[in-house]
Amino acid sequence: MIKGRRTHNNLEFFRNLVVRQVRQDYLENLTGFAWLILQPLMLLAVYAFVFSTIFQARLPESANISFVPYLAVAFWPWTAFSESIIKASGAISANAALIGKVAFATEQLPLASVTATFLMHGAGYAAVLLILQLGGVAIHWLLLPAALLLLLALWLLACAIALFTSTLQVFIKDVAQILPPLMTFWFFTTPIVYSAESLPAAIAWVVDWNLMAWFVEQLRGVLLFGELPWSAALVWVPALILLLFWMSLRFFRRFSGHFEDFL
């Protein structure tokens, strides 16, 4: 009975953290929610112009789709993934006043930050898919549950990385400056603004070791081409993500007892 009540209280506290994060980042001012949609749209327009007009990026002929939907379907999940990790990495430092004064599992702070970011960008993603549909792009809505499962796995990967980086940032303040360029590097080594087929054979192996590349390809296949992912990766990718999450959670809990000394 006591354990069940404790679990309920933890879930309620986590829900309140998520709601607070959403309000703080997106709903407390007029530009917060608008910028959530406008910023990715502006970046999408810039990337579409640069890579399709200036660099004349070409998609595989078998794709039979224009560059903008090809880019948009991959760009929004990446934005949620990248932004959630960068924001969550500072979650412990930003909530230093709570730690030591309120009894709660401190891992809820970065996890709530990641969850809030994914929820809000998920709303933006749905809006973009609807705009693409109205613009004449055939979105396979019947396979939306498969896309949601992929996004859930991506959320769990972001949680795993956020637990690790938020722990490091307590002890190594430079993580806040190092992380954004690292995410930018990851972005350009993921086939988001180009197709994996366009990579030279000498560096094509990068895609094979890039988890984000797998998510990008699967989301495009599901939403744009109506292809369900059937491969061995459906087993080992979730297994790897669960392992990373477990290791990151252990790493976080191992050092969380020392947070107060460094905040």
Image (cartoon, helix red, strand yellow):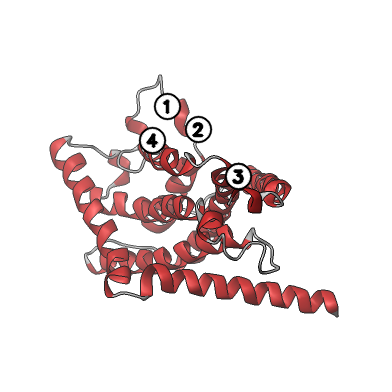
Q: Residue at x 45, y 62 (%)?
A: 117
Residue on which the image places disc 3: 237
Q: Residue at x 43, y 49 (%)?
A: 82
Find out whether the residues at labels 2 and 1 contact each other: C-beta distance under 8 Å.
Answer: yes
Find out whether the residues at labels 3 and 2 contact each other: C-beta distance under 8 Å.
Answer: no
Q: Is residue 93 left or right of residue 199?
A: right
Label 2 crowd (10 A; few <14 / some 14-19 / many >=20): few
Label 1 crowd (10 A; few <14 / some 14-19 / many >=20): few
Question: Nearer the N terminus, badge 3 or badge 2?
Answer: 2
Q: Position of residue 232 (x, y in %)?
A: 62, 42
Q: Position of residue 107 (x, y in %)?
A: 64, 58
Question: Nearer the N terminus, badge 4 or badge 1?
Answer: 4
The part of the image, by quadrant, that contains residue 57 is top left
Amino acid type at circle 3 is Val
Q: Residue at x 31, y 74 (%)?
A: 29
Question: Nearer the N terminus, badge 2 or badge 4?
Answer: 4
Task: Quote the CA–CA distance across marks 3 and 2.
Answer: 12 Å
Q: Which mark is residue 185?
A: 4
Say if 20 sits above or below 92 in the image: below
Residue on which the image places disc 2: 208
